C-alpha cells in the first residue's frame, strides 16, 4: 500500500483538474446510506456529489476518481469497486472526511486504499516536531509591496 500526502489550502479545497473528472460517476456508499437504506449512489456525477456535499470537496473527489481509473486499468471489474464513506463513529478525530476504496473479492469487500481530508493536522504535527515552520505560498492576483 502506498500513501500520498497532498496538502491543500484549508480555505480553498478546489482542485485545478476537477473539470477533467467532474462528469464521472463513482459507486458511492455514503455514511448516510449505510445508516438508512444501504444503497449505493451510482447515478450521481462527481460535480453533483461535491455540490450536494456527498463528497466534501473537489480535491477528495479528484483523487477518488483517479483511484477508480487506476483500479479499472489494473483490470478490476467496475462492479467490484465501491467507495465507502466512514461513519462518524469510525472517523479519526483529526479527519474531516474519509472514504475507503473497496474491492469485492473472495473474502468479501476489502479496503484497498483510503482518501482522507485531514485538513492541516499532519502539516502542523510535522512543524511541531521539526521546529520548522511549514507553510505554503499563495500567489496573489495583485502583488502586495511591503
Image (tube, rainbow, N blue to C red):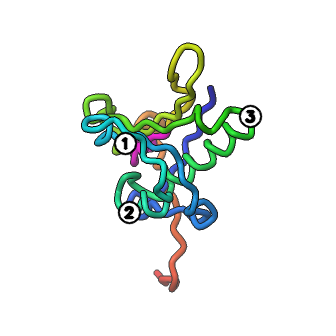
The residue to which callout 1 is attached is 30
Q: Which residues are magenta?
A: 115-124
Q: Is residue 125 located in the magenta-colored stretch of the structure?
A: no
Q: Nearer the viewer, mark 2 or mark 3?
A: 3
Task: Find the distance from the CA under tag 2 to the CA under tag 1.
Answer: 24 Å
- Image quadrant assignment for residue 87: top left
Of callouts 2 and 1, which one flags the residue occurring earlier in the amino acid sequence? 2
> Which class describes the residues within 10 Å of circle 3: few (<14), some (14-19), or many (20+)?
few
Under circle 2, the secondary element is loop
Q: Residue at x 44, y 40 (%)?
A: 116
Of callouts 1 and 3, which one flags the residue occurring earlier in the amino acid sequence? 1
Of callouts 2 and 3, which one flags the residue occurring earlier in the amino acid sequence? 2
Under circle 3, the secondary element is loop
Task: Find the distance from the CA under tag 1 to the CA under tag 3.
Answer: 25 Å
x, y percent for residue 23: 57, 62
Residue 80 placement, left or right of 116: right
Q: Residue at x 31, y 29 (%)?
A: 90
Residue 114, above or below 119: above
| Disc sitting over residue 11 in the figure | 2
Pick the front one: 106 or 137: 106
Q: Residue at x 48, y 54 (%)?
A: 43
The residue to which callout 3 is attached is 74
Task: Find the distance from the CA under tag 2 to the CA under tag 3.
Answer: 35 Å
Residue 65, above or below 50: above
x, y percent for residue 124: 40, 43
x, y percent for residue 113: 55, 31
Residue 45, above or below 110: below
> Which class describes the residues within 10 Å of circle 1: few (<14), some (14-19), or many (20+)?
many
Pick the front one: 2 or 63: 63
Amino acid at each position: 500500500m502506498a500513501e500520498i500526502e497532498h496538502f491543500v489550502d484549508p480555505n480553498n479545497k478546489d482542485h485545478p483538474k476537477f473539470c477533467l473528472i467532474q462528469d464521472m460517476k463513482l459507486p458511492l456508499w455514503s455514511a448516510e446510506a449505510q445508516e438508512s437504506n444501504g444503497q449505493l449512489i451510482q447515478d450521481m456525477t462527481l460535480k453533483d456529489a461535491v455540490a450536494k456535499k456527498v463528497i466534501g470537496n473537489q480535491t477528495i473527489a479528484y483523487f477518488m476518481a483517479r483511484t477508480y481509473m487506476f483500479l479499472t486499468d489494473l483490470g478490476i471489474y467496475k462492479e467490484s469497486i465501491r467507495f465507502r464513506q466512514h461513519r462518524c463513529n469510525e472517523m479519526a478525530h483529526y479527519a474531516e472526511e474519509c472514504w475507503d476504496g473497496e474491492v469485492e473479492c473472495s473474502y468479501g469487500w476489502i479496503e484497498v486504499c483510503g482518501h482522507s481530508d485531514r485538513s492541516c493536522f499532519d502539516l502542523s504535527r510535522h512543524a511541531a516536531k521539526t521546529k520548522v515552520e511549514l507553510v505554503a505560498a499563495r500567489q496573489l492576483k495583485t502583488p502586495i509591496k511591503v
